[in-house]
C-alpha cells in the first residue's frame, strides 16, 4: 500500500551518479512519490545519502529483506545494465513495481524474462524512457505523426561524451559501451518519429588510439525501416559532448539540440522548417526524472499500464544486439518486421521544476 499520504514509496537500488544527480532529487519534485530506502554496496553512500534523504539503507545482501519488509511499493533500479535482472526479477516476484533504467538488459532473453515476470505477478514494469514524459519531445513526436513535416524519410543523429577511464562503462565490454548506453536515445527517438521498427542494421566501430575502453569507443549505425525509410546515428565515449538529431520529411525538417540530455540548463529545443518557413521552439528546463517518476506513480495508483513497458525496452535491446552482431561479423543484420506500438501520449507530459542537486558522494563502485 502507498504511504499514509497516498504516495508511492520507492527504494533506490544503486547510489551512482544517475541516482544521486537526477532520480533522488527529482522524487522530491513530485506530489505522488517518496523515497523510503536505499540499496548500496558502499558504506559511505549508505550513511551519507541515507542521512540527506532520510532513508533506511540496505546492503545488496539485504535486498530480499527489503522486498519483504512492507516498507516500499516500488524500486528504481539503476545498477549497470548487466546487473539489472538480478534485482528486477526478485522485486517483480515479490509484487514490487519496478522503474528500470535503460537499456533494459544486455540480452533479449533477460528482457523477456522481466516482462514475463511482470505479466505473471501483475507488478508494473516501466523502462525509464524519461523523454516520453518531456514536453518538447512529445511535441515533436506529435507534430511528425500529424504529418506536419510530410512523410518522414531520413533521420541522422550524433551523441557523444567523454567517459572517464575509471568508470565501470570502460571496463565491461559491449554491454556497458556506447551502443548499449547511449544508442537507445537516437534509436528510441527514430522509432517514435517514424512510428516503425528497423528491418535491417549495419554498423562500423572504431577504437581511438589510447582509449581505455575494452570495446569500440565510437560506433556508427545505419538502419533501414519499413517503407524505405533510413536512419543513421553515431555514438561515442571519447569525443566532446554533443547531442543532436535531424529528421527530414517530404515537407520539411526538424533539427533538435539539445535533444537527449537532462539537468541544469538543458532545455529540449528544436528548429522546424516547413515549406521553407523556419521557426524556433525552446521548451523550459524540466525535471525529467521527477516527471517520469510522477507518471509511473500515477500508473500504479490508477492501475494503468505504463507506456514504456517491457516490450518497449525489448524492442530497443533487440536492435542493440543486432548492432553488436553487425560489428562482430561486418555483415548487415536482418530483423523481423514488427507492428508499430502505441506512441507516447500528451497525457504523459510532466512539467516539474528542476530540483536542486546536493553535493555528490564521490566514491567509485563497480555495481553503481
Image (cartoon, grey):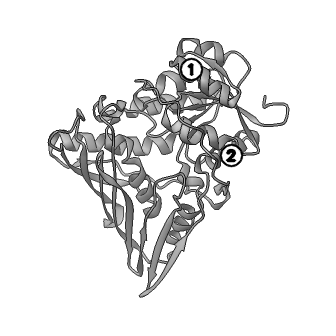
Q: Where is 257 relative to 36, above or below?
A: below
Nearer the camera: disc 2 or disc 1: 2
At which x and y percent is residue 309? Answer: 55, 42
**Residue toward you, 306 or 102:** 102
Tell me residue 285's x, y (percent).
59, 59
Q: Which mark is residue 182?
A: none
Report whether 329 appears left or right of 344.
left
Figure quadrant of the N terminus = top right
Asked if residue 41 lies left or right of residue 235, the reply is: right
Residue that mark 2 sits on: 294
**Where, by quadrant of the figure, is residue 94 drawn?**
top right
- Residue 365, placed above or below residue 61: below
Secondary structure under the numbered disc 1 in the rendered image: helix
Q: Who's the residue at 73% across and 35% down the image?
A: 8
Q: Is residue 264 left or right of residue 68?
A: left
Element type at mark 2: helix
Residue 305 seen: no
What is the x, y in percent for residue 198? 35, 54
The residue labelled by disc 1 is 90
66 or 199: nearer the viewer:
66
Sooner in the amino-acid sequence: mark 2 or mark 1: 1
What residue do we see at 63% from left, 19% from top?
57
Q: Position of residue 130 (x, y in %)?
A: 55, 49
109 sits left or right of 117 in the view: left
Q: Residues within 10 Å of mark 1 (few under 14, many from 20)?
A: some
10 Å neighbourhood of mark 2: few (<14), some, or many (≥20)? many
Q: Quadrant of residue 319?
A: top left
Q: What is the CA distance from the residue labelled 2 to the residue labelled 1?
A: 23 Å
Amino acid at each position: 500500500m502507498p504511504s499514509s499520504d497516498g504516495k508511492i514509496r520507492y527504494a533506490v537500488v544503486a547510489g551512482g551518479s544517475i541516482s544521486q544527480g537526477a532520480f533522488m532529487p527529482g522524487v522530491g519534485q513530485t506530489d505522488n512519490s517518496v523515497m523510503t530506502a536505499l540499496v548500496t554496496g558502499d558504506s559511505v553512500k549508505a550513511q551519507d545519502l541515507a542521512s540527506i534523504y532520510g532513508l533506511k539503507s540496505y546492503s545488496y545482501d539485504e535486498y530480499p529483506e527489503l522486498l519483504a519488509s512492507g516498507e516500499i511499493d516500488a524500486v528504481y533500479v539503476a545498477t549497470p545494465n548487466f546487473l539489472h535482472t538480478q534485482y528486477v526479477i526478485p522485486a517483480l516476484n515479490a509484487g514490487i513495481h519496478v522503474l528500470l533504467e535503460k537499456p533494459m538488459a544486455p540480452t533479449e532473453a533477460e528482457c523477456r524474462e522481466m516482462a514475463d515476470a511482470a505479466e505473471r505477478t501483475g507488478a508494473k514494469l516501466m523502462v525509464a524512457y524519461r523523454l516520453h514524459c518531456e514536453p518538447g519531445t512529445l511535441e515533436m513526436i506529435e507534430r511528425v505523426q500529424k504529418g506536419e513535416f510530410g512523410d518522414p524519410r531520413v533521420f541522422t543523429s550524433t551523441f557523444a561524451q567523454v567517459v572517464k577511464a575509471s568508470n565501470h562503462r570502460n571496463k565491461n565490454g559491449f554491454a556497458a559501451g556506447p551502443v548499449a548506453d547511449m544508442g537507445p536515445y537516437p534509436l528510441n527517438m527514430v522509432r517514435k518519429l517514424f512510428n516503425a521498427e528497423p528491418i535491417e542494421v549495419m554498423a562500423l566501430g572504431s577504437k581511438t588510439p589510447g582509449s581505455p575502453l575494452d570495446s569500440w569507443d565510437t560506433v556508427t549505425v545505419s538502419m533501414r525501416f519499413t517503407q524505405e525509410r533510413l536512419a543513421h546515428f553515431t555514438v561515442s565515449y571519447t569525443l566532446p559532448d554533443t547531442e543532436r538529431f535531424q529528421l527530414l520529411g517530404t515537407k520539411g525538417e526538424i533539427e533538435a539540440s539539445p535533444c537527449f540530455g537532462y539537468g541544469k540548463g538543458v532545455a529540449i529545443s528544436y528548429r522546424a522548417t516547413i515549406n521553407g518557413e523556419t521557426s524556433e521552439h525552446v521548451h523550459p528546463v524540466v525535471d525529467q526524472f521527477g516527471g517520469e517518476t510522477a507518471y509511473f506513480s500515477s500508473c500504479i495508483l490508477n492501475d494503468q499500464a505504463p507506456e514504456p513497458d517491457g516490450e518497449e525496452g525489448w524492442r530497443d535491446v533487440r536492435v542493440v544486439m543486432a548492432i553488436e552482431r553487425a560489428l562482430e561479423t561486418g555483415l548487415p543484420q536482418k530483423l523481423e518486421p514488427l507492428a508499430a506500438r502505441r506512441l507516447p501520449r500528451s497525457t504523459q507530459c510532466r512539467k516539474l521544476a528542476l530540483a536542486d542537486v546536493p553535493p555528490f558522494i564521490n566514491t567509485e563502485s563497480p555495481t553503481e
